[in-house]
Amino acid sequence: NAAAEGSPVGALPSLAALTDAIATGSIHPGIRLGGHPDEPDANRLARLTATGLAELERRLARHSLLTYQQLLNRVQAAVAGPKNSGVLNTLRSRFRVALIDEFQDTDPVQWEVFRRLFVEGDPTGPALVLVGDPKQAIYSFRGADIATYLGASGLVQRRANLTRNFRSTPRLLDGLNALFADARFGSSPEGARTIDYAEVSAGDPSPGTLD
């Protein structure tokens, strides 16, 4: 449709940029690209992204399909608000303990669901166990947000470090412990939580070999 809007094909955003923008918009439905009067390329990308997202919604609805993110958004809506206490009570009575592994890759919508279910409400209700390492957070492309991990870590009642490593040799761990001693990761504002390094030891004391 480049001719229809009076733009040469070369002036349009690349397919990769458009695909990334549509993917980001589908993962974060509350975020929309905004144009700028002095940035025609940004304006075109914003318009085409909005068109692509609308077309994606139409095609999904036509085939009665939901994306993974849409499923999450519906669950979030089901547990949000004061009128949904029935859903919350049903789920809380069904599950006594919830464990989230690889919690560093949790996105804000997922955390909001678990926060509503297992953090808010009766303190004697279901327990929530979070297992994660923020230094291994790699799923930002899928919506995971390290700020979600740091915010949740400030709400926990008890914290424990896994200090035995069964995957690495003692010499490697000794080197890592020396390298990262007293290290603080991340560039956080004053007073914000930082990511600390916890010293670990080898679960198997034998030196190990490489075959």
Image: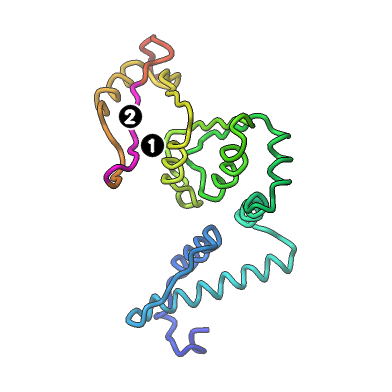
Secondary element under disc 1, as helix, strand or loop, is: helix
Residue occupying the point 60% across, 72% down? 54
Image height check: is 117 above or below 126?
A: below
Measuring from the top left, give residue 205's x and y in whole percent: 39, 10
Question: In this figure, which residue is indicated by the disc labeled 1?
Answer: 135
Residue occupying the point 67% across, 71% down? 58
Which label's residue is closer to the chain start, 1 or 2?
A: 1
Secondary element under disc 2, as helix, strand or loop, is: loop
Q: Magenta region: which residues?
A: 190-199
Q: Label 1 vs label 2: CA separation?
A: 9 Å
Tell me the number on the disc at residue 2.
none
Measuring from the top left, give residue 28's x and y in whole percent: 52, 59
Question: Magenta includes 17?
Answer: no
Q: Decide if residue 86 is on the left or right side of residue 55.
A: right
- Which of the 4 image quadrants contains residue 191? top left
Bin the neighbour count of mark 2 within 10 Å (Cα to Cα): few under 14, some 14-19, many 20 and up. Answer: some
- Which of the 4 image quadrants contains residue 6? bottom left
Question: In this figure, which residue is indicated by the disc labeled 2?
Answer: 197
Three-letter amino acid code of the residue under disc 2: Tyr
Image height check: is 169 above or below 64?
A: above
Image height check: is 169 above or below 56?
A: above
- Which of the 4 image quadrants contains residue 178? top left
Q: Nearer the viewer, residue 68 or 96?
A: 96
Q: Please report contact status of discs 1 and 2: CB closer than 8 Å, yes or no.
A: yes
Residue lying at the far top in this picture: please name it.
206
